[in-house]
Amino acid sequence: MTQTIPELALAPAAQDLLFREARTANTFSDEPVTPDEIRAVYDLVKYGPTAMNSQPLRITLVSSDEARSRLLPLMAEGNRAKTASAPLVAILSSDSDFHEHFPTTFPHKPDAREMFAGMGEARAPMAELNTGLQIGYFIVGVRAAGLYAGPMTGFDAAGVDAEFLAGTSQRSRVIVNIGHPGADAYLDRLPRLEAEHVITVL
Amino acid sequence: MTQTIPELALAPAAQDLLFREARTANTFSDEPVTPDEIRAVYDLVKYGPTAMNSQPLRITLVSSDEARSRLLPLMAEGNRAKTASAPLVAILSSDSDFHEHFPTTFPHKPDAREMFAGMGEARAPMAELNTGLQIGYFIVGVRAAGLYAGPMTGFDAAGVDAEFLAGTSQRSRVIVNIGHPGADAYLDRLPRLEAEHVITVL
């Protein structure tokens, strides 16, 4: 049976840039990446939707040698060399005190901040889920900037929180190496699940 | 001080389609959305990266009247009319048994399935985080198809799990109304956080 897949509105070149030809880079060239380039990424992906416009994602850019030297020992051994060589590294974290911004981000419901302040720990799952969505947007945005992302969860999260996020309501979720690909940057692409294993129609 | 924002590689029209002009639709026209259109979305966004290529996102498309009648009472009251009128509704869930696919998805590490089988409940947080990323990719993909998404977390998640996901290792995370915008589809866009509140440079 021949299956005709409907065409997408997004131009094929953009599909390739963001998904089809985009790859996780494991080595990087010397070309630098500036914080302003990441600000431009944020300026695009900030429009991605979150529940109650909560926007719990926070981004810590590890740019200086000093900061990087504190991060490297906290990376899983298999990720250390990659993170050492990436031009820029982003610690993506979730802020469970997202409600503090509700007067700005959810202004039509003036009691939202107080209501969520009373929820305490129950805010954390909402922060985690919506941060996950925003990390997805962010990775797409890095690619939209023509940069290559190497997202990782292999690190000592409690150690990163203590070293970089102490005194905040943030918890690290994903660390992303960002740069331009170097020599032998890519592993073979791993197989994706067929739609029949993922999609159920009721 | 004038700040120059670096230009992105992604064409401006694609930036608009996916982020800048994309909006959450709250009403929908009668134009249908077929499961094949969502298969095309999946066929693009499946390439988004996940930890260990785990791909824990599962998609249950609520297409029939019968299935929708079971879903509506489980939606928060404020979401019920939207979900009743959306041409297609997707229950996005995380599968904590993602490791069962490792022989296909992570073939270079033959003992991965067995290793993760022994982790039990500890797989759930990994499933949640990576499903979050994939929900982000999926929302971008719905927009890439020229469709409008209305993602919601306001529903009885335990009820949805019991009604639609019983006997599986899936947990519902986000429900997305999908369609073309109807009359008065949009609320005013809510403010996004300025980069200075989100990005820290070390």
Image (spheres, coloured by chain):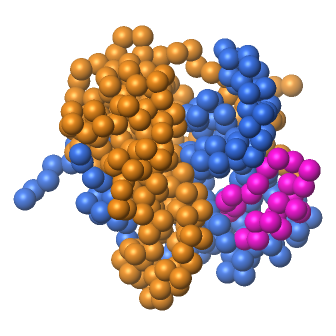
Chain colours: A blue, B orange
Residue B77 percent across, percent down from the top left: 46, 24
Which of the 4 quarters of the picture holds residue A24?
Answer: bottom right
Task: Count how many numbered circles sit on residues in the image.
Answer: 0
Which of the 4 quarters of the picture holds residue B179?
Answer: top left
- Which residue corresponds to the image point at 28% horizontal and 49% vertical from the top-left? B39
Name above or below for residue A168 compared with residue A62: above
Residue segment shown in magenta = A155-177
- Which residue corresponds to the image point at 43% horizontal and 44% vertical from the top-left? B159
Name above or below for residue B45 compared with residue B122: above
- Which residue corresponds to the image point at 74% horizontal and 27% vertical from the top-left? A115
Q: Pick the quarter of the image with the N terminus of chain B.
A: top right
Name above or below for residue A38 compared with residue A76: above
- Which residue corresponds to the image point at 58% horizontal and 34% vertical from the top-left? A51
In the shown orientation, is residue A84 left or right of residue A151? right
In the shown orientation, is residue B117 left or right of residue A104? left
Residue A92 percent across, percent down from the top left: 71, 53
> Is A109 one of the magenta-colored residues?
no
Residue B74 percent across, percent down from the top left: 41, 35
In the shown orientation, is residue B131 left or right of residue A32? left
Residue A5 percent across, percent down from the top left: 21, 48
Question: Relative to the observer, which residue lies in front, A178 or B49?
Answer: B49
Question: Relative to the observer, which residue lies in front, A187 or A48?
Answer: A48
